Amino acid sequence: MKMPLISLGILVGMTGVGCAGLDEAEAVDSSMSADATSQVTQGVITQVTGTSPVTFVAMSGNETKPYNQSFTPVVAYTRDSTTGAFTAYPGTGAADGTISVPNVPSGRIYLKLGSRYLVSTGRTFDLGSTEWGRDGTFVSLPTPVTVSATGLSPWQSGDYLEVYSLNAGAFGYVNTGVTGFPLAGATSLSGMSFNYADMLNPVLLDSSLGDVLSLVQMRWKTTANGVPYRAMHKVLDASVTQVEGQPVTVSGTFTQPAATGTFSVDWRRSAFEAMRTQVNPDAVSTYSEIWMSARPAALSSAVASISGQPLLVKLNPDAQKTDLVTGSMTYNNPLPATWPKVALAAAGFTKSYALGTAAPYTMSVDIRVDQDASVFTAAPVQPLVGPVQAPLVNTRGAFQNLTGVGLDASLRWSKPLVGTATNYVVNIYRLGTNNGQTTVTRVTSLHTDLQSVYLPPGVLQAGQTYFAEIQSWYQPGSDLATSPFKRALPRGRASVLTGMFSP
């Protein structure tokens, strides 16, 4: 079974060193929930269970399989709120996707699954997900695809090529920097070659399973309001069977789909930019963009993934952060007419981290909104939830660099100023160096509905340096602490990056 992308990449944000801001006197808001959960009713013993059904949504038909948990370390921890001590209760995972931890006292637990912790009072966990495409294998070896085709509209410098396979769930894009990339004015591809393994989701294609490789000319256009954008324009479809590591050749003609559509937004970019210093006082704004696409109904409904291509419209017109009314953006649509349309708006931010004299690592995060596309056209597009406020490591302001936080540190925060967070996710990153460069490794993620987490044993190590990303999530109807891989619309997310800290 291919590893679901949502399990691999979800909740990871990646970005100078901040010092300023908060001090020890700052307090969390009085409504903060505390993790005083280990004061349990003596003698009440429970069992923790979970299932991991993965539903693959493909043109050839949907299929549900269990995700094999037999190689996943499973441990439930309780924490004594008086002593701060964690107690471990070992569990097991099975090939049928189930997990089980027996003899766990009642109260809040930190359920460890691999490197992830689910912080919850629940005892039943849904570890499943819904994924675009059939169950398949990701390509890792260089696997060249060479394309010779006619029928392009005269190529423009702002055009690029989308690559996708609806049945396999493969997607990616081809831009400048590959052999034979079209020059301005070209109406054909002559031996353009790209490495399929470089795609964002390179599922190995097999025409006998119904896989079709599609290449799309995403065309640079401008609205009547003078706003530039890219839209799906012409498509080349080809049945392709790949052998990993072996080249394939594709030929044919790009044609223009008969179906068309329009999309327009009132984009409040200033509302995203207003949150920059809440991400971190030293955060730098990097990009703003909106994507619009279509998805099978099973992916556009509640508790399903909607990430990925193919895109019908991509909007990142300039580096400005001012508000923008686009006017009508037109596109050609080769996707099934019954597929619902969805949209995403995101603003990116970075912060640099450096150990000693090593060159800094730039960590990137974002504030984003996922909605039904009709909502984007009906009302101004702005954040659904903002970054958390007043982040603390133990009792000290987390935007400054800290030492001596201890191996059992806690992170706390106040609620966002904008919107209502339904859950929070804390990612802990460890800094290192390699060949004069600062490196970053994610150590763990903790999902919670509280405004605080304690770091379980082994997360922090003496002599190491860390930082945290605290994500606020708005996703009504889905609890990330008991169903970490479920997705629903509407959805909003915003990140905070702390300063560096060490035990």
Image (cartoon, helix red, strand yellow):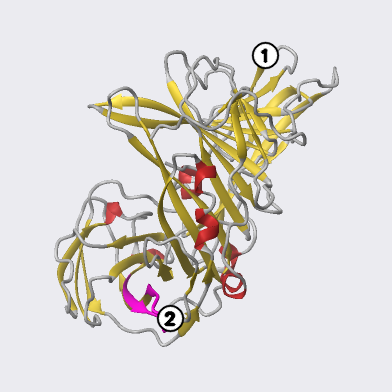
Residue found at the very far bottom of the displayed protein: 258
- Give the labeled residue for mark 2: 225
Which amino acid is tagged 1?
Ala
Q: Magenta segment range?
A: 215-230
Q: Does the magenta stretch include residue 223?
A: yes
Question: Which callout, 2 or 1, points to the residue nearer the camera?
Answer: 2
- Magenta stretch, main secondary structure, is strand
Q: Estimate how packed mark 2 is, as few (under 14), some (14 to 19) or many (20 or more) residues with alpha carbons within 10 Å.
A: few
Residue 52 on image: x %, y %: 60, 43
Left or right of residue 295, residue 189 in this image = left
Q: Which residue is drawn at 52% across and 80% down?
A: 337
- Give the labeled residue for mark 1: 85
Q: Which residue is drawn at 69% across and 47% down?
A: 422
> Hey, which quadrant is residue 480 in on the image?
top right
**Depth check, front residue: 63 or 322:** 322
**Depth check, front residue: 275 or 118:** 275
Relative height, residue 11 to residue 268 (above, below): above
**Disc 2 from disc 1: Cα separation:** 61 Å
Residue 59 on image: x %, y %: 48, 68
> Hey, which quadrant is residue 332 in on the image?
bottom left
Mark 2 and mark 1 lie on one chain; the one further toward the N terminus is 1
Secondary structure of the residue carrying tag 1 is: loop
Q: Residue at x 50, y 28 (%)?
A: 400
